[in-house]
Image: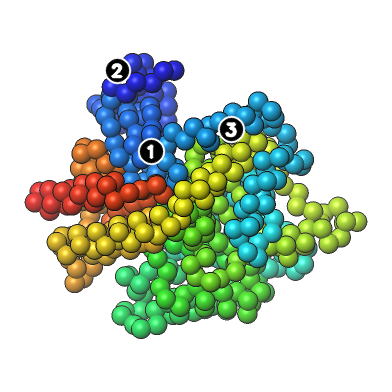
Amino acid sequence: MNISPGSNDFGEAVESDRAHVWHHLSQHKRYETSDPLVIIEGKGMRVWDANGREFLDAVSGGVWTVNVGYGRESIADAVREQLVKLNYFANSAGNVPGALFARRLIEKMPGMSRVYFSNSGSEANEKAYKIVRQISHNKHGGKKHKILYRERDYHGTTITALSSTGQNQRKDQYGPFTPGFVEVPHCMEYRSQYGPCDDYGVRAAKAIEDVILREGPDTIGAIVLEPITAGGGVITPPDGYWETVQDICRKYEILLHIDEVVCGLGRTGTWFGYQHYGIQPDIVTMAKGVASGYAAISCTVTTEDVFNQFKADPSDPMSYFRDISTFGGCAAGPAAALENMRIIEEENLLDNVTAMGEYLLTRFNELKDRHELIGDVRGKGLFCGIELVKDRETREPVHESITQAVVADCMANGVIIGATNRSFDAYNNTLCLSPALISTPKELDEIVDAIDNALERVAVD
Ligand code: PLP
């Protein structure tokens, strides 16, 4: 299809969408009176819809995914070339881009060793859980099978990924859940469970140890954590948190699984979010930015030590990892991922993220001086959250209608921003930003100005 924004050629697509497509996370009643949003083209950081409207995308494809921006011909070329040569073969055999990408990835992850391919963040996390469960069966008679997860973290949409998710609004009505997942408290200093204190990070980490001792350390195989919580409110970890978590994991022989589905591949200015905190995970999962949305690919990466446990006894037919993902063998994913990584390196995007991230945080902090509605500004690299409150003193969150009004105002003025999920009990009050790694001050100013104006209008209403 030859796309020309604004040409009005898309009426049929819009009507077909309205009639037949069930959109993610959407209440469809509203499409009885308004058009569904159908995006037809993207270039750089901008997208166009079927009505010819242009938007600056401040959330990289809506869900922090299109890290290197839209319209990258070199990725499309790499994928095309690979598909013509070999589109697919089950991943019980290797393929060339998969092998080369695995090596390039491991070069960026000291201490890690093996890459298991699948298609989505949820699936990558499920693989990690299965690895932990199988180790528990092989080494601990099935006893060390529990997996800890943290309040406010999200790990995916399947029932078991949801079982390990600390956001009630996503879980309500989908139970019963998979047994063996246990929640630990969040580490969000702005909403400290202990009141103001100097050692919040250490206390928040020690709260994990309390849960471990309550459950029994010999029952816990792993803990899964986001390096910076994304959809739960862009929660940057407090000082001292990660070092203490790592010590606790080592003390009780609990595998540390870091979910890099959002932070991975440059979002925070390092290849992976955990690399800011000097920790060494045992398992790392990633998806969205791995190929910037040009192909579906996710990875479950482990240390050699974890991997070795699956080949220790070749005579035991139960010892290897008895798992498969059909489309983990699609060669388009690693072909796109290889080129995506080359772009990040060649264009020095990690440095750009660090510089532009500081610029964006500075600008948002300036907004905080002018808008009483802003309670807290958080972020690392091009990954920011702005928490809105009714009252700075009490920190009472604004009603979700206020957050949504800001999002809608920005959208009406051509800038797409995100927010923590609707009907998220008391926590539906954070604006989320994750512009592409290629951002320049020009686009960031446009984003900040749109939020500035939206807050002005919303405060007056
Ligand atoms: N983990 C985190 C931290 C996420 O934010 C997400 C999705 O937003 C997932 C896992 C699930 O990824 P997917 O939607 O690709 O299954």
- Characterize the local packing of mark 2: few (<14), some (14-19) or many (20 or more) Cα atoms within 10 angstroms: few
CB atoms at circles 1 and 3 under 8 Å apart? no
Relative image position of residue 238 (x, y in whole percent): 40, 73
Instruction: Tell me the CA gap for discs 3 and 2.
Output: 30 Å
N-terminal of the two: label 3 or label 2?
2
Q: Is mark 2 within 8 Å of ligand 1?
A: no
Residue placed under numbered mark 2 in the picture: 8
Q: Nearest the camera: 392 or 345?
A: 345
Residue at the location (45% across, 44% down)? 68
Dot in front, 1 or 2: 1
Q: Kindly tell me whether residue 62 is visible in this rendering.
A: yes
N-terminal of the two: label 1 or label 3?
1
Q: Is residue 154 above or below residue 191?
A: above
Instruction: Tell me the CA gap for discs 1 and 2.
Output: 22 Å
Q: Nearest the camera: 143 or 232?
A: 232
407 lies left or right of 224: left
Label of residue 79 in the image: 3
The amino acid at mark 3 is Val
Residue placed under numbered mark 1 in the picture: 44
Image quadrant where residue 233 sits: bottom left
The amino acid at mark 2 is Asn
Dot in front, 3 or 2: 3
- Characterize the local packing of mark 1: few (<14), some (14-19) or many (20 or more) Cα atoms within 10 angstroms: some
Residue at the location (45% across, 78% down)? 240
Q: Is residue 115 above or below residue 138?
A: above
Q: Is residue 134 above or below residue 347?
A: below
Q: Nearest the camera: 401 or 95?
A: 95
80 lies left or right of 306: left
- Characterize the local packing of mark 3: few (<14), some (14-19) or many (20 or more) Cα atoms within 10 angstroms: many
278 lies left or right of 417: right
Residue at the location (30% across, 18% down)? 7
Q: Residue lying at the far left in this picture: please name it.
A: 460
